[in-house]
Image: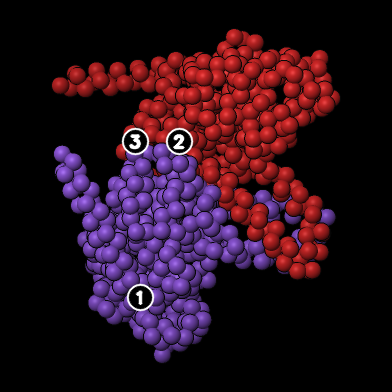
Chain colours: A purple, B red
């Protein structure tokens, strides 16, 4: 039985999304229970109204709520009894295997980092997300905005935690292929930071497939694509924007005239299948990676179905015992890199 | 009458694409003539086979061809009689108002920069492209890969040349709205370079609308979106990749079974309209901006229809007398910024 802690007050709509989302998730997954964190009275009402299966739900009271536009530092200092903080505390105290929140991203990251700390060897947590790619595959892309400036070493750390997460979730699929997001596939491409990260990744034990371009996120040629948070965030928003743009354009074409409208009726099964495949709600759930606990961030403006997918994401990671695996993988990978570095330094000394 | 110089040997397929592309372009545009640059005998054959209108075509012989994988510096040094170089020379010598090539991007940029030089005040040329956005609009995005590292001042220069190009092409549309590509809309977002560029853009005379996110490329909220070449190139490839991915997914849904296949038949008019709207060939033609002459780079792997669109792009810029306008605009904008800077320095001195 997996236990997830849910920040029930987070997100643009709070309880009216998190509670029905939680209920629909519980109906889908049997081997899970939820700690719903928030205002006790309001939660009791909302859960009862939604006909929630109370045998798998416990309510944990939290008196405060972090505002969507609140500064992370202010939330950290002044909202110690917020639904967000208390939900993350459940993970720290071992009462839940993962926390999920649709609240303020910056505050959640600051809280998660402060409460849970990073995995030894990981300087900074990253935000990661699975993006659908060719042939029904998924590509994990990170960092999506937690770290605007990154050192080559931090990019390598992201590669390691991304690779270990995918390996934990799909243990039978072999060593995940890791690509470095760049402006071309040749070694000499990119900024100095990226060039240095390339060299480090090449000498690592990761299944490094080299530089990949923006289009490779969808081609399925890498399982993990690594970038700094500035590039990653812009790429993610560009993908979301282009999906919105293209689906709007298709809709407009089908609304052009009577003939195309009739065509839309006949095309309904295929169009529904397409819509379902690329439904952004299904890819809701950004993973805060590199922490000593699973934290998943739902989109703040999602609906109940989208929130249920974020819970699903957290459930799979908790079930795969991803943190223990990532922690072990990081230790091994970084020990290997350190050894390589010492060898290189000794070689340099003996040449002198 | 506008004259365009065409590197007839450039691109993956050379003459077999450039000649039919040129012919179809000439059929569409009456007030233009072409200087077809390349091997004289081969060109004469290809033009005659394509039934080219020779009253508006002159062949300019060039004995060499720049290879698609040739190093830019090698092309610059060893291929002084290449079709690419001779085509760019036509612009420098005032014999053509624009040059178009589907050849090696790096070599074309090096050649164009060496032969034509940058506009006074512009340190480095940028690569720009119009991306389709909401409501049939277009967003000019730059730099798309010419400059992996940029200073804040260079980002401002890109903003100026992008804005002046759009203004030259659409003089009646008011001052183009310029956005700075970033990870959020707040002033405090982004890398140090981007933050400094933000401040400079705010004090400029441009119609600066502030930071924009990746999705804004398609939303129509900015006419020009500025980024360094590292981010810009990754964004462009991501857009191309997501369009390919989504169109493949739609096709697959329509091929799922008999019902969806019948649906596809009925949906044909709308699907064709959609395909036509987002046809990448229509957005072929990357603009090398900041040079003292119009140079347009066609995709190396495009077909004749795509190459004709690149010629179209060059034609519109030449017709709008874009270089003269950009040159004047740059002088005014940069003079204003310099004045601002001196004022700020004097204010600082008087405080001391």
Report in which chain the residue with disc 2 lies. Answer: B
Q: Which residue is mark 2?
A: B229
* Marks 2 and 1 share the same chain: no
Q: Position of residue A285 (x, y in %)?
A: 44, 65
Taking the image as drawn, is residue B130 in sight? yes
Q: Which residue is mark 3?
A: B193
Q: Residue A295 occupies which quadrant of the picture?
A: bottom left
Say whether disc 3 or disc 2 marks the residue closer to the N-terminus. Answer: 3
Report in which chain the residue with disc 3 lies. Answer: B
Q: Secondary structure at mark 1?
A: loop
Mark 2 vs mark 1, CA separation in Å: 40 Å
Residue reaching furthest bottom? A55
- Badge 1 crowding class, 10 Å Cα cut-off, few under 14, some 14 to 19, many 20 or more, is some
Nearer to us: label 3 or label 2: 2
Dot 3 and dot 2 residues touching (CB under 8 Å): no
Q: Find residue A180 and name its label.
A: none
Q: Position of residue A213 (x, y in %)?
A: 49, 46
Q: Vertical placement of A290 versus A342: above or below? A: below
Q: Find residue A321 and name its label.
A: 1
Mark 3 vs mark 2, CA separation in Å: 13 Å
* Marks 3 and 1 share the same chain: no
Dot 2 and dot 1 residues touching (CB under 8 Å): no
């Amino acid at each position: 039985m997996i236990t997830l802690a849910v920040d029930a007050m987070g997100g643009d709509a709070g309880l009216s999304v998190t509670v029905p989302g939680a209920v629909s998730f519980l109906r889908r997954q049997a081997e899970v229970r939820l700690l719903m964190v928030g205002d006790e009275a309001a939660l009791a009402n909302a859960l009862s109204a939604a006909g929630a299966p109370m045998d798998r739900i416990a309510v944990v009271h939290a008196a405060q709520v972090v505002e969507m536009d609140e500064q992370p530092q202010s939330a950290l200092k002044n909202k110690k009894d917020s639904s967000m903080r208390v939900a993350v505390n459940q993970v720290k105290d071992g009462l839940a295997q993962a926390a999920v929140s649709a609240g303020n991203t910056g505050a959640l990251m600051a809280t998660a980092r402060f409460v849970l700390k990073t995995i030894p060897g990981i300087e900074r947590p990253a935000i990661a997300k699975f993006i659908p790619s060719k042939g029904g595959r998924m590509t994990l892309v990170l960092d999506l905005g937690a770290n605007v400036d990154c050192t080559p070493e931090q990019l390598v750390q992201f590669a390691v935690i991304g690779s270990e997460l995918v390996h934990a979730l799909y243990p039978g699929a072999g060593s995940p292929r890791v690509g470095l997001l760049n402006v071309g596939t040749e070694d000499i491409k990119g900024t100095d930071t990226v060039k240095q990260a390339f060299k480090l990744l090449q000498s690592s034990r990761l299944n490094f497939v080299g530089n990949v371009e923006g289009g490779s996120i969808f081609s399925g040629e890498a399982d993990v694509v690594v970038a700094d948070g500035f590039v990653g965030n812009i790429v993610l928003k560009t993908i979301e924007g282009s999906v919105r743009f293209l689906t709007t354009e298709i809709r407009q074409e089908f609304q052009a005239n009577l003939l195309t409208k009739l065509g839309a009726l006949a095309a309904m099964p295929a169009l529904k299948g397409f819509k379902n495949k690329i439904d952004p709600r299904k890819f809701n759930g950004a993973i805060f990676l590199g922490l000593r606990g699973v934290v998943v961030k739902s989109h703040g403006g999602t609906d109940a179905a989208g929130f249920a997918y974020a819970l699903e994401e957290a459930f799979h990671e908790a079930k795969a015992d991803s943190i223990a695996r990532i922690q072990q993988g990081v230790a091994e990978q970084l020990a290997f890199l350190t050894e390589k570095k010492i060898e290189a330094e000794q070689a340099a000394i003996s040449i002198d």
